[in-house]
Amino acid sequence: MLKIDAGNIRREKFGEIMLRNDLIKIGRNEPCPCGSGLKYKKCCMNLAAPRPVDMAKLYERRYGIRLKTPHDVEGIRESGRLVLNCLDHQPTHIRPGITTNDLDRLVHDYAVSSNAVCAPLNYKGFPKSICTSVNSVICHGIPSDQVLKEGDIINVDVTLVYKGYYADANKTFIVGEASDDAKKIVSVAAGSLKAGMSMLKPGNTIGDIGWAIQNYAESRKCAVVREFVGHGIGFEFHEAPQIPHYGKRGEGIVLVPGMVFTIEPMINLGKADLFIASDNWTAITKDHKLSAQFEQTFLITETGYESLTPFVL
Ligand code: MF3
Ligand code: CO
Ligand code: CO
């Protein structure tokens, strides 16, 4: 068994790293990570100077994770800018009296005028262009003629495809004057995403992200939803890997440069349990207490991360 230290990468060029003795283990009978097609033991295993690892091939073969090139990242970043524009416009429209259908229409029209496509529309039968999740709705709320009222909280989740590249982000907004409960859950949800972000660098694991989020939220007496997770993104809406918002330190896949995925913790004021409404989409807290969420799309870089949908938390 050999291990690659993804936290101590000597970069040859994007997508390739040199072997190091640490985290990523290669079995002697596995294909050699240099991409030769030979078994590892018949190739680089015993070389004093092993060839560069083809990380893209290794992660695709092992985990189904498609690492992104700088060109891909540029496309996702552009898509992300459009997603952010949609979210930035929300506060000028969100007020008592507006319907969630109105917000859906605004994003849809913006996408059309920007040559982008709203990914949710018709995705596995989803009937609208964005998700709007109000109060005890955790996620996947369907825009409707529901009228927002003073003190509601509403999550607006926007995913766009632009030049073939997907970017995904969401924010929870407060309608008018907020209750203490609303302020608390929105603040803990934002802090949870921040806690997850603090783990984003090569060599850390997916478990570290979940651990940081769970630790942050639960120490504030809030609960982390288990049924929905963050996800790889870029070429498709939902790619490998899954990013749970709970977990154990050091467990799971090692983060490497070129990974692009979302973190999108759904945090409940009461218990974590949920049910799905009869529309087969809307996820609602079982105790009907408030739930909030923030989401961004992240790239793992050589030294840490870049948000491809950056907003201040
Ligand atoms: N945007 C959501 C996410 O963060 C997924 C919505 S799927 C839909 O992954 F079909 F409801 F749009
Ligand atoms: Co997402
Ligand atoms: Co989303």
Image: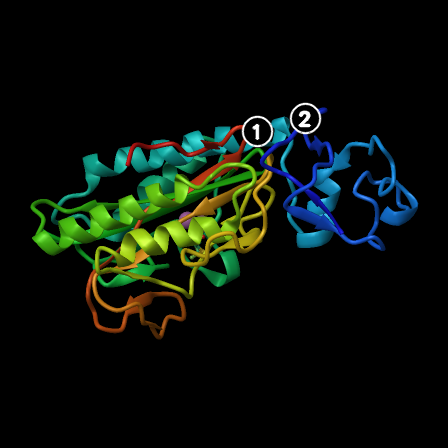
Label 1, residues with CA under 10 Å away: few <14, some 14-19, many ≥20:
some
What mark, if any, has residue 77 been given in the picture? none
Nearest the viewer among 311 and 82 is 311
Q: Toward the viewer: 279 or 182?
A: 182
Front-lying residue, 40 or 262? 40
Quadrant assignment for the C terminus: top left
Horizontally, is 229 left or right of 2 in the view? Answer: left
SS for tag 2?
loop
Q: Position of residue 6 (x, y in %)?
A: 62, 38
Query: Does the Cβ of the disc 1 residue fall within 8 Å of ligand 2?
Result: no
Q: Is residue 234 left or right of residue 280?
A: right
- In the picture of the structure, the residue carrying the numbered disc 2 is 11
Residue at image x 61%, y 32%?
8
In this view, the residue in front, 47 or 276, is 47
Q: Is residue 113 visible?
A: no
- Find out whether the residues at labels 2 and 1 contact each other: C-beta distance under 8 Å: yes
Q: Is residue 202 visible?
A: yes
Specify few, some or many for label 2: CA neighbours under 10 Å numbering under 14, 14-19, or 20 or more.
few
The secondary element bearing badge 1 is classed as loop
- Disc 2 or 1, which lies upstream in sequence? 2
Q: How many marks?
A: 2
- Measure the alpha-carbon separation of dots 2 and 1: 8 Å
Kindly identify which numbered label has been placed on residue 302: 1
The residue drawn where x is 26% and y is 69% is 271
Against 215, residue 33 (above or below) is above
* Residue at 64%, 39% in the rendered image: 5
Q: Amino acid at mark 1?
A: Glu
Q: Is residue 238 above or below residue 107?
A: below
Above or below 154: residue 89:
above
Q: Position of residue 227 (x, y in %)?
A: 42, 66
**Amino acid identity at mark 2:** Arg
Residue 171 location (% of width, % of height): 30, 44
